[in-house]
Amino acid sequence: MYSPVLQEYVQQLGNYAQIAPASIELLEKTLACYVAVLGRAINASTTPQSDFFDISVRLLLLSDGLARLPRDEALDGAHYLVGLGLEQVIEPIARLGLREIPKPVGPLENDLWYGLSLSFLHYLAGGCRVQALCVFQSLRRIASDLVEDERRIQYQNALEALRALYSVKKSSAEFLSGANAWYDLFFERVKPRDSQELRLQRLALLIRQRRDAVLANLGEDDEARWLSTRGIKHVATDFWRDYLGSLDRRGITAFTREQEGTEPGFVWLQSGNDLLVTLPTGSGKTIIGELRTALALLQGKQVIWTLPTRALVRQTTRDLRKAFEQLDVTVEELPTTEDFIPLFAEGLEQPRHIAVTTPEKLASLLRYDNTGRTVQNVGLVVFDEAHTLLSQTRGTTAEFVLQKIRHQVPSCDIVLMSAFLDAKDILERFLVKLGRHPDLLDSDMRPTRRIYGVITNDDCGARQHPTVLLYPPGIQTENAKTLNPFRLTLSECLPQRISPTDTAQRFVRATTEAGLRTVLFVRTPASTETQALKIARPQAELKELTEHDRARLHVELGRRSAIEETGTKGVACHHAGLTPLEQTLVEKWMLDGTIKTVVATPTLAQGVNLPFDISVVTYVTRNGKALSASEILNMVGRAGRAGYASDGFGLLSVERSPRNRAVEILDRSRRFFFHSQEPSKEPLGLARLVMNALNAKVGEPDWVVELGDLDFWEAQSLVAFVHSIAMDADDVNESLIVQLESFPSVQQLGEETKRQVVDMLQELADNIQQVVSGGDPVLTAVLRRTGMPVEVLGNFLSQLHSVHSVESSPQIQMLWADQIVRTSLERCSSRKWYVRLMSDAGSDVDLKTVFSTIFLWRSGAPMAEIETEWQSGRTSEKQSRIKLGKFLNHRLSAFAQFWGALAVCYEELFGSYTTDMLGMLLKGLPVFIREGVSSWEQLEWLHSIGDLDRVLAHELSRVGDLTGGQTLIRNHVRNWKRGHHIPRELDEHYRMALSGALDLSHY
């Protein structure tokens, strides 16, 4: 029999995605309690009123009734509801320290622990393992805080037993049985002593009976048979067994329905098929790519991961190293520059190798090696953030990479992953046109709960106050009206006129002080630093920065960092003008709790995964254009992180005019949160480029030298593409048609449009032939390989023809190459492409400053010294510093390409340069410039210590006992990580920085 309370819910509750009226009431009461806890933490009044006693009784009655029922998938929603309610009521109280635990007290006498344990068990019973992991993190925090408590061992035992129950692994039995009373209770080795233990045991039984997506479904203990069912035979099963052990060690022992797929048993996990994954942020796309990666490595194939930004490349490289390095798999960034010169392409021929890179880097490798030799053993390409195929700036390169690999290695599998559900249809069509019908993993079910609303300046009596209004629980639509919003009102009074940013900043000051993890999005990099200072100013010291992190910053920058200034107060800025080291440390501090608040530009919303409770967006327009709903959702979507934060508040800060009520602002903002997403109809990849080319009239005679009305990279890609087709074709028109039709995006254009494109590119091909000096074979070859401006290439070749000898000193050779590049650019200063290139570098930056900056950067000068050279009297010190950071992070590679083109010219003139010192130096110069080093040895040091500490890499190369080749350098780093002492020849602050770079606790 159902209890009266349970009967009401059981009759009406189905899957938790289809919320019934009874559950709506419970959700509203639960959210009221959650909001009340947050209000208490930030000293805000809240409505509606909460009743913790009432909701606790309801949840416990429902919990008791569910524990008595046999397992039934129809009750999954009820289990989820209880887990949600207990988590929302208890977790913030525990994490924010709003209630002390009486000491000494055991786990069952600790209301916070017991309630969260029930939440954990109900989540697991309902199959909601991602949410259960969030609760487990909360339980672990409680246990870790009891360092001196005499009952601490009881909490540790309970935690270990809960972990065993989460993984449902029989292998835990021998280790825990008899030594852990909690384990014995969960696995029915003892009888419960009271009603509390009985409820825990019954819920544990439901969980054990479920066993729906554990490692057994991945072949654990039966690896050979499991692999053979996927057509994989005659391979060593040890690697797969070891990989499953890696999953176990990292706590990845269960999977969601979205990850497993519509059919049980991971049907999509097999070689020979492409895969499209469109799941919301936090749904576990990375582990899907990782599983496919492990399967490819098992078969002796190499794997390439591509991501759109270097920040994501760094993050993914770290994640993959944690997963695979103990399995003797090499994981590294693809060592290729964006300037067409592969450095260590042979790395892709090594066994069990994962390369992580951007599409641009991979494209340069593929252009350089038309034979496909360097990628012939690649068995899988994982393309994360695949919606960048629709990008104006990266779509063409991304499509080129995928099309080229499919052509050169037809057996290579492709996995596209994206959180943008509106891109699903066009990405699926893309893969079909690429030659295969993909398997699909798609869902709009988020593993984290989003609570949307606005921050505004609302009247409360005679004065205005920062006020948060939230949409109530239930199904929301774009055009609905909010009758009873949830409300938090801060006590601080506001001036009569105040910007949305300043209103939000006052709210975030309160969340920071309370310890709530918050990200505040503002328009500009300068504003991130200003707002971070304002938020930090009234805060008490939260946590001292480690001396290792400080040392790394001081060595690299030669000054205090903007993040260091506010970091001890729990706040940091994050923007594109910071060095990669600063960006990475902000992310590290957020993860380890050193800081609670990040003030950021949208660069942080591009996939960087951090555990925020609250995300606040302060603007809805940028550069005079309205932001799309997807852009705003992507920023507010930073709140809530699967496995770390089940609930996320996504808030938009909007100014209220005197004639508007706050609730009207809330409903007016619905279009940003609840607008129906329609499938994208935008052209992607090469189709987007050729459509832009039509508008730019690239068939006109002077376009070849001016490269006008296209971005530099677009013009470069177009010239290389067209010239490569035309120079080997008997019939250029026919060859253009064939090549264009091989690209999935172009196949989807209308016939008339394709005809116009072919005609235009035919004219462009003819014009290119006109300017390559009557068919000069060397210039023709270089233009095909680089697509760089013809005038620049002609000048490079002219100067190289006249070279008789260059002094053998590498320093002199570098200066000689610099001078060739500089004079060649100066001769083109009137060209449209040059004006655009310099404008992108900085509106008040000239070529002299660019070259001085490159020289200092490459020489290992700290940032403070480079900033002095870069500083313009027309901008503030902060603005100049930010512009320099943007240049080095995002524009420097465009200039480095000219040195790369010089190296290509040298190779085409003089052949292979494996024993030619000048040729080898020219080959390295573009990557030296991009990475900020001046020798191969310094480059190896930089890669070995994590790619972030440029000045430190220079210093290590100067220590006599550390000099040597790649093998010696890697041995030094390996030994230091194993505990060997860092040589005393390094000054103390360098040793401290090196210790931090290698994550060592000693030096």
Image: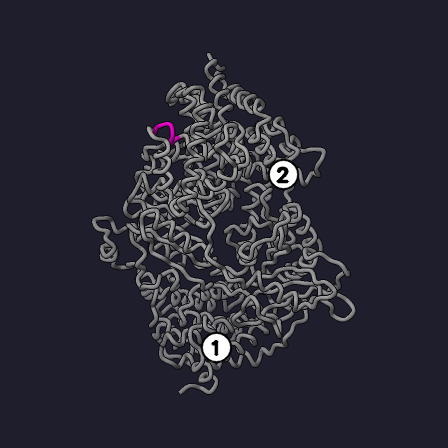
The extreme front residue here reads 752
Residue 325 visible to an observer of this rendering: no
Relative placement, left or right, of 83 versus 328 is right
Disc number for residue 535: none
- Per the image, the residue denoted by label 2 is 883
Query: Type of residue at label 1?
Result: Ala
Q: Nearer the viewer, residue 924 or 849?
A: 849
Can you say whether 280 is above or below 855 in the image? below
| Mark closer to the observer (1, 2) | 1
Tell me where residue 38 appears, x and y as whole percent.
Answer: 62, 67
Q: Give the amino acid type for the residue marked by disc 2 in the picture.
A: Lys
Residue 129 visible, this orientation: yes
Q: Is 727 in the magenta?
A: yes
Quarter of the image with the N terminus in it = bottom left
Upstream in sequence: badge 1 or badge 2: 1
- Segment tinted magenta in the rendering: 724-729
